[in-house]
Amino acid sequence: MCLSSLVVNGFCTDIVVLYLCVLISSSHIPEAVAEVICIRANNSRCKFYCGQDVLDLSDIDGSSVQPSFTNIPDSRGAPVFYQWSPCTKFLKNCSVPVNVCRVFKAGGEPDNLGDEGPTIKFDHDRERYRWSYVGPEEYLIGELKTNVYLEYDGLSEGRTSSMKNYGDYFTMTLYTKYVPRDPAVKNKVNDGGGLSAGSVILIIFVCITALYLGIGMPYMKFQRGARGKEMIPYYSFWSEIPALAKDGCSYSLQIIQGCASSTSAEVSTRRNYERI
């Protein structure tokens, strides 16, 4: 009805255009998530600048023949142990230089669990920095990956948790004093720089309502000569909404009551048959 009666005057066209502009602009509101890029420091083998945070594991980084950690246990007690160095690739048990290696206690060819990396990102779910390594692609398993989460421990140079094995990727935690106690990127996220979905919806609703009334009421007054409540565009339609909502709720309740009565009748009938 609106398009057929008012499109000539351009009123509905303006409303639709303004609505789409508000909707599109609001969809580009950034979320309250801060991403940082970690850059390796010059002339440093294991020091990274991640925004305002500094991650420096140089003091616990291994050498080309000796990994930093050599006997990391498996979380499920499997007859294996893991070796890891944060930055420097080592050649000890694995046949190629790696950052992460899995060694079988019974012998056999060790597994390369990561020779590319580290790639450092802040995990917003765990609120910790994550060092990721990528290994070769294995048949039927896929690309092997290892994630090491860094957690502050002011009393430890460096100690690890056991390694968790999820088939194609592995994960553990490093506890060390060489990472920030309270990462700046986490505080930036908690401070909030964006809007939640509910806030966006509320803003859209308020803007559309303001546009609807701000443009519609002058139009109805000066073009249609409306007065009082009739200045609200399609007032009769809006005034009927409460009654329609009430009728809808009443109808829904009747349907629910009818279903409940039908179910009770079926149960009663079954019980009667069982007694017979």
Image: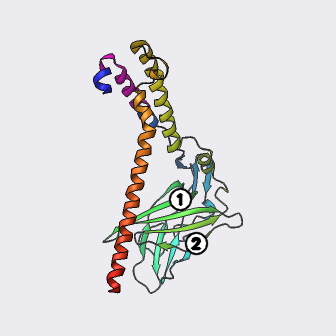
* Magenta run includes residue 16: yes
Location of residue 187 in the rendering, given as x and y in whole percent from the top left corner: 63, 48
Above or below, comparing residue 69 to residue 48 in the picture: below
Instruction: Examine the image and state in which quarter residue 95 appears.
Output: bottom left
The image's mark for residue 146 is: none
Is the image coloured rainbow, by chain, by secondary structure, or in one colour? Answer: rainbow
* Disc 2 target residue: 161
* Magenta run includes residue 47: no
* Disc 1 target residue: 130
Location of residue 12 in the rendering, given as x and y in whole percent from the top left corner: 35, 24
> Image point 37% across, 69% down: which residue?
263
Instruction: Examine the image and state in which quarter residue 122 appears.
Output: bottom right
Location of residue 206 in the rendering, given as x and y in whole percent from the top left corner: 51, 32
Q: Nearer the viewer, residue 135 or 6?
A: 6
Image quadrant containing the C terminus:
bottom left
> Image point 57% across, 72% down: which residue?
69
